Amino acid sequence: MKPAPQSPRSAEPRLTPLTWWRMTRPAFLLLTVVACLLGTATASACGCGLDVPLALGATGLAVVAHAMGNVLNDLHDARNGADAANTQGVFPFTGGARLIQSGEVSERQTGELVKALLVFLVPAGLLLAVKAGPGVLLLGVAGLLLAWAYSAPPFKLMSRGLGELTVALAWFLVVVGADYVQRQQFFIIPASAAASLALMVAALLVINGVPDAKADAEVGKRTLVVRLGIGGAAALYGFLVVLAHGWLAASVWLLIPPKPALWGLVSLPLSLVAWFILMRRAHEPQQLKPALALTVAATLLHGLGMAWGFAQMARLH
């Protein structure tokens, strides 16, 4: 007798909790935690106090939203062929989680995880808005729209040279949102700090796009790096990291954030070394791992440095 045919679902890989976790690209979620720390610190420094449960709730929701964005991006990069074509990516910094390409998960399972995370986010976000104010809804909807428009058709902003701007805006909203949850109103100081971190995030996206540029171009994914070329992308990276640190220094001079926020400048040496490596090795993607690691470290350190400075101000209240 012939064996009964398997259903598409029964033929799919069996997923473990660890696999689900790996699908979210957990190492990158730390950036959202740092952004939330920064936003919480800006509110505390202004004498708004610290509501720990609200801070933890806002951070948890932001991390889940980031995870959903990562999974959604992997799904659409699988569908457009970018990840399958990517043989020059520098894992784990570029090229996605690659679990679909390795056969560890299916596209359907990836889509189901996106839906599950969204089903959790909507009611949880509404609950946070009840506790912290209606601005949470505005920020949350904007963030989810950016995450969707970045990867999914019809917008596919990552393929139109707008991915870096989209992601920078998303992290700008994370910092402002974490501050809003504590302050329950919008204010210029968190927006100023958020702009500095957002520029660093944009630079991170630029350098991450360099090893992926060949594969992206092959599948018609016209990222900013593809449009500018490798040399132009390296120049843009330098402009963004200098602007991020320059804006922080200028904003303190303009008396927007307090002087202790200048602790964010501790990331400048790492950014400059990464830029130097990128300028020398931009056409050798596999040689960019040190620059990619330094950029991640600089971005995290930039946010943590500013958060530390604001936290010192909060201790005086």
Image (tube, helix red, strand yellow):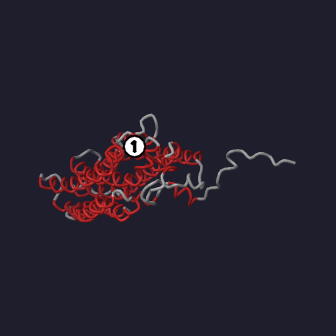
**Element class at badge 1:** helix
Q: Amino acid under label 1?
A: Met
* Residue situated in front as seen by the camera: 50 or 30: 30
Q: Please tell me how crowded label 1 is: few (under 14), some (14-19), or many (20+) other residues with Cα within 10 Å.
A: many
- The residue sitting at the front extreme is 283
Image position, residue 60 (x, y; %) = 42, 54
- Figure check: 270 above or below 53: below
Q: On the picture, is 207 further left or further right than 247?
A: right
Report whether residue 232 is seen.
Answer: yes
Where's the C terminus, which quadrant? bottom left
Q: Name the residue rendered at 45%, 44% in the picture.
A: 218
Q: In the rendered image, is residue 182 in sight? A: no
Q: Nearer the viewer, residue 279 or 115?
A: 279
Question: Which residue shows up at 65% across the image and 55% down it?
Answer: 14
Residue 313: x %, y % from top left: 20, 62
Judging depth in this view, the residue of 260 and 148 nearest the camera is 148
161 over 261 or under it: above or below = above
Residue linked to disc 1: 158
- Residue drawn 38% across the image and 47% down it: 131
Q: Position of residue 209 (x, y in %)?
A: 38, 51
